[in-house]
Image (cartoon, rainbow, N blue to C red):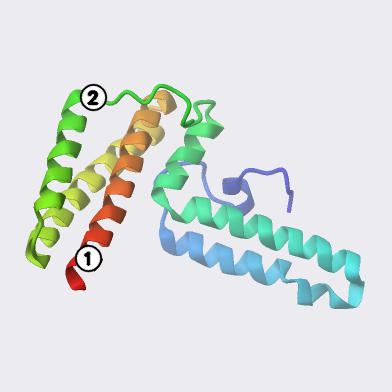
Amino acid sequence: MNLQSDDFELFGLPRKFAQERSQIDARWKELQREAHPDRFAAQGAAAQRVAMQWSVRINEAYQRLKDPLKRAAYLCELAGAPVRAEDNTAMPAAFLMQQMEWREALEDAASEQELDALEGEMLAAKKQMLGECGRLLDEAGNAAAAVQQVRALMFVARFAQDVDRRRDQLGQ
């Protein structure tokens, strides 16, 4: 294992957006077993510290690879197009209008059914955006364009949290 390898190399996966979650999970378990500090107890404290560093590295890679949004952002970064907050975050007008409509609908939602409908619409949009992100990264090799999709997905992820908060408010 090489601490300097990228997450895909570490997990023995192709460097692409489309991944099977079950493969990521299985490989994570294998790597954790290999690097578990208890396996190095007989070799002393230094070996256990190195194993602990490996374990942390494996967990960090797992967190990036298992989440499609984090995986997309990581692939953009590896391709030289990092998603940075300080960069221009201008979004297409249609996307901003959609966000405004969702925010208004969320504010007006007075029932679980209304929230379910809004969440369904949001999840459908997220699925479409993830598909486009995968196409841009895996087929078109256009990380710069994928950055825009990642930013849009970040908006959607924040909105999903707001939907959950609203759901909690209604449940009180």
* Residue shown at 59% from the left, 48% from the top: 7
Closer to the chain start, of discs 2 and 1, is: 2
Q: Pointer 1: what residue?
A: 169
Circle 2 packing at 10 Å, graded few (<14), some (14-19), many (20+), is few
> From the viewer's perspective, is 148 left or right of 36?
left
Decide which of 80, 137 is in the foreground and name it.
80
Up the image or down, 104 lies above or below 63; here it is: above
**Gap in angstroms between the C-alphas marked 2 and 1:** 31 Å
* Residue shown at 8% from the left, 61% from the top: 110
Circle 1 packing at 10 Å, graded few (<14), some (14-19), many (20+), is few
Decide which of 141, 68 is in the foreground and name it.
68
- Residue 16: image location, x then y, percent: 46, 41
Q: Pointer 2: what residue?
A: 92
Q: Quadrant of the C terminus?
A: bottom left
The amino acid sitting under disc 2 is Pro
The amino acid sitting under disc 1 is Gln
Up the image or down, 64 lies above or below 73; here it is: below
Q: Which mark is residue 65?
A: none
- Residue 49: image location, x then y, percent: 82, 64
- Residue 100: image location, x then y, percent: 16, 37
- Residue 151, picture quadrant: top left
Q: In which quarter of the image is the N terminus?
A: bottom right
* Residue shown at 57% from the left, 63% from the top: 28
Decide: marks 2, 1 in contact (CB < 8 A)? no
- Residue 114, picture quadrant: bottom left
- Residue 67: image location, x then y, percent: 43, 53
Up the image or down, 94 lies above or below 119; here it is: above
